[in-house]
Image: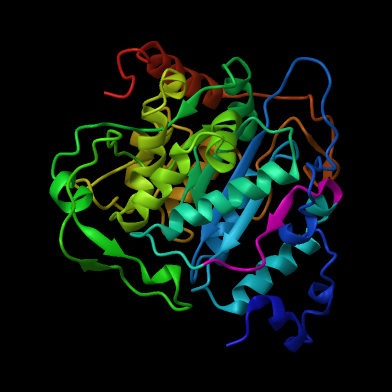
Amino acid sequence: MHKITSFFFFLPSYPSIVNRNSPVFVEDKVSPTPTPTPAPAPSGPAIPRFAYFISGSKGDLEKLWRTLFALYHPINHYVVHLDLESPQEERLELASRIQKEPVFNEVGNVFLIAKANMVTYRGPTMIANTLHACAILLKRSNDWDWFINLSASDYPLVTQDDLLFAFSSLDRNLNFIEHTSKLGWKLEKRAKPLIVDPGLYMSTKSDVFWVNPKRTLPTAFKLFTGSAWTVLSRGFVEYVVWGWDNLPRILLMYYTNFVSSPEGYFQTLVCNVPELAKNTVNHDLHYISWDYPPKQHPHILNINDTDKMIASNAAFARKFNQDDPALDEIDKKLLHRKKGRFTPGGWCSGKPSCSKVGDLRNIKPGPGSQRLLTLIFKMSYRLFDNQCK
């Protein structure tokens, strides 16, 4: 099997993708020093910027594309990734679509990781994939404030104008990471077993396997667990990637053999650094309907969950099937987004609407901003009580 980096030369139906200097490929745009996005920085009151990482696997092309359009705002940064299990044709199709979208070309803020990573969701490869995106975004630009990791099965419940408005008043050091030290059943099923993830050294996906003997709990740091989906401050991302303290590397090696490590790595890291823990809100800003017990697999959301999603005041929800009617309902009621189009915002210009980039300072929040602020202030008010316990 050819790697995607060489596969371009075997598909004549994609001649525009052969040009490796095209801005669609994130690896070609990464330079030794930070390079700002072509989008002009707005003047006036500080408006935050988000750096999104949206990842998917085999069969997720259409879901990822829809989520990207629903999340898009020219002030932000977007790195997208279809993992190594997805067919090369899907990854090439994604690259082609990004190249052909006029707004993406005008702004230059949507990039594809061309060399796909292997991702096995119960092993550490998901962490490696996320850290890869973090490192790319740090090198690409120094003008974003929060990193948000999402999957193709996620979908926004607020517009980007709502999100930008809500976060404009927040301390830029805040992290939104669901966490708890009460491991419960995870103590025996996650913390003590030792696993090996073949995704670290194989080019095809297979499940993790267990090895003996089990290990004892660590004494050098305290374990925490929580959601794999986070909103991380730039300062925390810099600490994780650059690692001027040794703890990020120690924990990365520890979680290499940990079952479902994406649910523990960032939580354990942030909660074992007091300076970071005090700025961490115990919420992932997602609406997720878990099975109970043991809260191991999320239910697939449908149109009957719409009212509960809205009532949660969350910014995002998961998990959705492709083109589920619930997504159409969210587009209609919450995002006011038409099929195949961007979510409307103050930046939209041209005819049809949002076909051109207008004033980036023009933020038009709707009811979603107030719902989100209600949740954020509620959780922030409890910040001290929830601080890594």
Residue at 70% in and 76% down: 5
Q: Where is residue 70 in the image (x, y as percent from the top left)?
A: 60, 46
Residue 22 visible (yes or no): yes
Residue 293 visible (yes or no): no
Q: Nearer the viewer, residue 378 or 176?
A: 176
Q: Position of residue 135 (x, y in %)?
A: 63, 47
220 relative to 143 in the view: left or right: left
263 relative to 22 in the view: left or right: left
Q: Position of residue 249 (x, y in %)?
A: 46, 45
Q: Give the range drawn in magenta.
A: 106-117
Q: Where is residue 10 in the image (x, y as percent from the top left)?
A: 73, 88
Check if residue 251 falls in the magenta segment.
no
Check if residue 108 falls in the magenta segment.
yes
Above or below, comparing residue 351 to residue 57 in the picture: above
160 relative to 229 in the view: left or right: right
Above or below, comparing residue 132 to residue 9 in the picture: above
Residue at 34% in and 45% down: 263
